[in-house]
Structure formats: structure tokens, C-alpha cells
Image: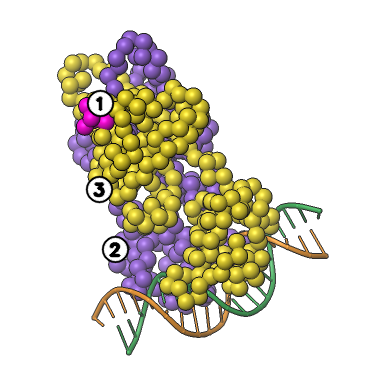
Chain colours: A yellow, B purple, C green, D orange
Amino acid sequence: MKEKLDRESLVPLYQQLADLLRRDIEEGRLPAGVAFPSERKLMSRYQVTRTTVRSAIGVLKQEGTVVAKHGAGSFVRDPKADRHRVDATGVGMRRPAPQTQESQNEAPTRSFRLTGILESTERRMPTTPWISELLQVADGTEVLVQEVTGFDTHGAPSLCRGWLHPRVEKEMALSEEDLEGYWLPDVLAIKGVPAVEGEDVVEAAMPTPNIKQVLGLPDGVPVL
Amino acid sequence: MKEKLDRESLVPLYQQLADLLRRDIEEGRLPAGVAFPSERKLMSRYQVTRTTVRSAIGVLKQEGTVVAKHGAGSFVRDPKADRHRVDATGVGMRRPAPQTQESQNEAPTRSFRLTGILESTERRMPTTPWISELLQVADGTEVLVQEVTGFDTHGAPSLCRGWLHPRVEKEMALSEEDLEGYWLPDVLAIKGVPAVEGEDVVEAAMPTPNIKQVLGLPDGVPVL
DNA sequence: GAGTGGTCTAGACCACCTT
DNA sequence: AGGTGGTCTAGACCACTCG
């Protein structure tokens, strides 16, 4: 929290400061809720103008990590607080029962594929209540989670997340290395598992800076 | 394009300027592509500082209406340009064929409902190629389109759009007034139509300023 | 080289919240 | 009353793009 800014660097001061503050938040030095240094405090601490401080905080606000309350102060927002989930199976309208065999046949089975996988990370994580219910495992069980960023079949920037059921992982003897660079369901398909129990879930959020950079997104474009 | 800014107003200068420019864009006075006045030009035209001009343009950038190219200028972006559509029926994983009767029964039929409808607009619009294919009508046919903003069953800010098939509209003798304040599928359900041909589509985008205000969203929260 | 957007300084006044 | 964020001014230098 006492590092200095590099005035010779190519990366602008307000970005450096934003990165510093983001790290402080991520690593718990600036806990969610009350605490956040005032703009004037940050000015004198880092020896920059208020404009620069405000730009830095502006970055964090746009990312949704920080909210400012006029007259009261700025606050770290719990990133999971208003992350919304939508069950995509029933969005908008109900699907009709097929009325004729013909209409049933002509209904295309579409599939969602990621093209140009740009980054994939695999890691072991305890399940959230919601996902434990889905997988029918005990809450907090460690499961293999994969995150893949890329573009979907329609060209939309997407981040897909897949959870591997421990039972499947054990039976198939899968490990992190097997998944590297492949989208989890594809791996399973190759290994002979035709389909996985699953649910279609769609979230939308503003991309984190690195994902935004990786996908080359302009400002104001959310990720599904 | 030559209106003045009201320095006594409660609404800040940069907002007024942003609103002015947005209107100029929407009403075609600032066409997409090349044209956009430089920041210096806007300074002298409206007698404000560059900071104020930049704030105004910043608003439009965050909305995705304008993109800036360092050294070249700012450009109006076609709002429909990179609007992405995702077929939600096949997102992520394929749904397995049910293996036992039991598992089939326990699969819940979820429905997506809007609670607290805050705003609904109905209007007649020519279909886009994509939607004409969906409805099986000629391209450009005028159909009744409804947009409803509110919160979904999970509390996520949502904007839902429904297209009414001309045939149904005629047979049911529906008009704009019937839809006012109700979500289209609900109206049909009441009228005795059990279900509508449809497809589940999910989009994400940054909210327009008025929708953002209506839903009371903080910065950085996209709308599904 | 002229023009553009990007960054930064050093001030100022205001509206708002907390005590 | 004192502190906070929100707005605005009037400058400056830089990196970049284009003809």
C-alpha cells in the first residue's frame, strides 16, 4: 500500500494507481464495505493531482469494483453482490409442445461453440451453494473448474465456465493437463461421454481488464 | 446543433453537452462513420473547457455510441454494429437425453418472469432479417414489438423484447392498448393461447441512460 | 507539420453527508 | 463545521495519425 508510481513509465499514472488500488482490494488490504481512502488522501500519498486520482478511481468504478457516494466516500463493492444469474432454459417465452411431427423435425438443434479460444484456465475450487445443488455434491466440495474466453458462434465475446463432476473426473481419470486449451465438454465428447448433465446459464458482466485486453474489446461492451 | 448550454441549470454542463450530442447522433445530424467535431471545436463552439468536452464525450464512449481513435478523431459507432446474439438453447453444454423416467420427472420446468415492470413500450417495426426468419414472414414486415424493462425472477435488471406474429395479432384482434403494462406472453396466456412459438435469446448490453435511471443501476452493470 | 485524442497539473466552487 | 465526492476552469506536454 506504500509503493510508488513510476513517472517514467509508459503506462499512465492513473492506470498505475488503478492497478495498485485494484490489487489492494483483491488481496484484502482494502476490505469491502466502509474503508476506502479519500481522494485527497490518495493525492498527498501518491503525490498526484486530484484529476489523476479521480481517473484511477473512475477505472475501478467502471469495472464495478468501487462505488462512490456523494459526500460520504467511496466504497469497495462485494464483486459477487449483484452478480446475476438467469436460467436460460425459460427466458422470455415458453417453448410450445411440438404440434406436428414435421415441426418437430424442422426444429434445429443448435449448438454453442467457442471459436478461437484465446485463454483457458483450470483450477480447483470449492463449490458455491448454487453449483453444489446443480452437481448434487456437498457444499464446498472441491471440483475442477474451467474458464475459457473466446468468441462464440455469433462472434460475441464470451467467457464460458464449466464444472467437472468429481465422479466423472475420477472415472475418466482426467486432470488439468487434459483440459488445457480445450473446452471441457469437447474433451468429454472425445473421451466417449456423449453429453454431460448440465444447465444452461447465462451471465453478463463487464469484462475484467485483462480479459478485455485479450479479446480486444472496446469500452462499454459486456461479456456473456 | 447550435443550441446553448444552460449554466444555471442543475444538470451539469457535460451532461447537457452529452445529451445534445446524443440527440445529434440519433437524429442523424452526426452520421455514423467519419464525422465528429474535434474536442477543440466543441470547446470553442460551446464555450467550455476541454475537460468538460471530454467528460461529455466520455459519457457517450461509455454508452458505446462513440469511439475515439488516438490522433485521428472520434467517430460515431453504428449502435447495431456489434450487438451480439446468443442462442440460449444450446449455451455451454448439450442437454442429455433423459436416461430414466425419474430424472425426467425431477427436471424442473423453470419459467422466467418479470417482476416489477417499470416501463413498457409498444411500437410497430419492420422486422430485421433475423427476426423475419424466426417468425416466417417476409423481410421488413411491420410487426408489433414490445419492450419491457424490469427485474427478472433472480433480481437481475432485464429488458425483454417480444415480437407478435401478424397472424396472431389479426386472429386475436390485439392492439397496442391491450399490451400496455403487461408482458406479451402473459397477455396471450390470458387470452387463451397456451404458448407461443418462440426462441430463447439472450443479449447483453450496457443500458441506455434512461433505462439505467429507471432501474436505478450503478455504473458498470450490463442489462440482459 | 498540423491536427487529434490522451494525460496531467494546480487551482476553484459546489452539493452532499456525517457529527 | 469539516470532510467527501462532483463539477469546472485554464493552462501544459505528449503520442499518435494523416496528408
Q: In this orientation, which residue lies closer to the viewer: B70 or B94?
A: B94
Tell me if label 2 and label 1 are in contact, CB under 8 Å: no
Residue A27 locus on image (x, y percent): 55, 51
Task: Inspect this view and state whether residue A159 appears.
Answer: no
* B112 in magenta: no
- Residue ID for mark 1: A193
Element on which disc 3 rests: strand
Q: Residues within 10 Å of mark 3 (few under 14, many from 20)?
A: few
- Residue ID for mark 3: A116
For badge 2, the amino acid type reads Gly
Residue A62 locus on image (x, y percent): 49, 55
Q: Is residue A177 left or right of residue D5?
A: left
Span shown in magenta:
A188-193
Measured Cα–Cα span from mark 2 to mark 1: 49 Å
Q: Earlier in the sequence, mark 3 or mark 1?
A: 3
* A189 in magenta: yes
Task: Inspect this view and state whether residue A135 appears.
Answer: yes
Of tags 2 and 1, the one toward the viewer is: 1
Q: Quadrant of residue B57?
A: bottom left
